[in-house]
Image (cartoon, rainbow, N blue to C red):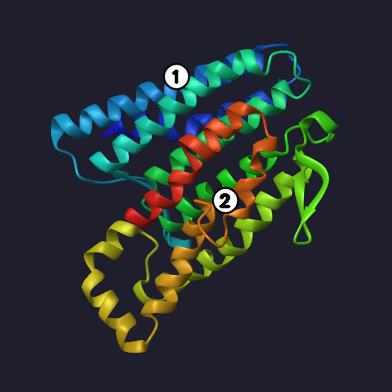
Amino acid sequence: MMDLVILYLLAVIQPFIFSAIISILYSVKKLPGYLSVFSLIMSTISSAYILYSIIEKSLNGVLSISQFSNISFSLSFFVDSYTGVMMVLVSFLSLVIAIYSLYYMDGDEGYGRYFAYFTFFVGSMLLVVSADNLLLLFLGWEGTGLASYALIGHWRHDEKERMIGEEGRVVANTPMFSYPSVSGLRALLFTRVPDILMLIGIFAVYAYTGTFEISNIFITKAQFLLELARTGMLLPIMFLLSIGALAKSAQFPFHEWLVTAMTGPTPVSALIHAATMVKAGVYYMVR
């Protein structure tokens, strides 16, 4: 059990620590990039060993590292094959993109800042795919949103060559061009409002079940669903919990943020739009 605790801390919590370290040492030439890659190597190896342990020992449960009874909050993680596969997928793809970023971002004035947010994003995604506690999952959820805002708007000085589209072109009163700072803010706003509704849905679930732990909700799911249906709250809570996933995965009508998100560096597009972030909504709905 202790081995699993260490592995989960190395895989999920460690990237946040390295992100903070990179934020302090951001100006030390190429060190931020190497620190980020080293962090993701540790996450990938730890995630792979977690998946191996789950398969070898047929593990299927929850690992609770600490419990805060006064606020019904626990640092708990799923230990099952679904979580293991997603952790390996997120960490490995992010590692490959980070290695590519070493060369792509070389010489960029925001080199250190880029890798600080990059590493923070990966930690947040790993938190989303492993957390058993809904509040912990939501913290990771918001972390991906914050990091995506910073990464999409990385070239915040809005040089003309960083713009996408044709400047001045307007179709149906809608500008057909965007600058990085605007695109980053747009992504933030398009996902924040649905996230607030999602948080309301999480607290509504807590009001009916008395717990934030997804595993505990599963145990009483039949009684929980019947109670929601009896009180007419089944559809409203389903809507509240689903809308955040729709926005994060850029589904209609929240797809507009993705259209202009390509103003960020190319590795950001690979990380956020192709590899991981848009999968967060899919994972959340399946879970």
Question: Is there any visible trace of residue 185 in the rendered image?
Answer: yes
Tell me where residue 77 sits by quadrant: top left
Residue at (38% x, 49% y) in the render: 283
Relative horizontal placement of residue 62, taking residue 171 as reference (left or right)? left
For label 2, the residue is: 142
Q: Position of residue 38 (x, y in %)?
A: 51, 17
Which quarter of the image is occupied by the C terminus? bottom left
Tell me where residue 3 sits by quadrant: top left
Question: Is there any visible trace of residue 9 in the rendered image?
Answer: no
Q: Secondary structure at mark 1?
A: helix
Residue at (52% x, 23% y) in the render: 97
Give the vertical position of 2 relative to 177 (above or below).
above
Q: Which mark is residue 41?
A: 1
- Give, as a three-letter code, the residue at label 1: Ile
Q: Position of residue 21 (x, y in %)?
A: 64, 25
**Measured Cα–Cα span from mark 1 to mark 2:** 24 Å
- Give, as a three-letter code, the residue at label 2: Glu
Relative horizontal placement of residue 52, taking residue 171 as reference (left or right)? left
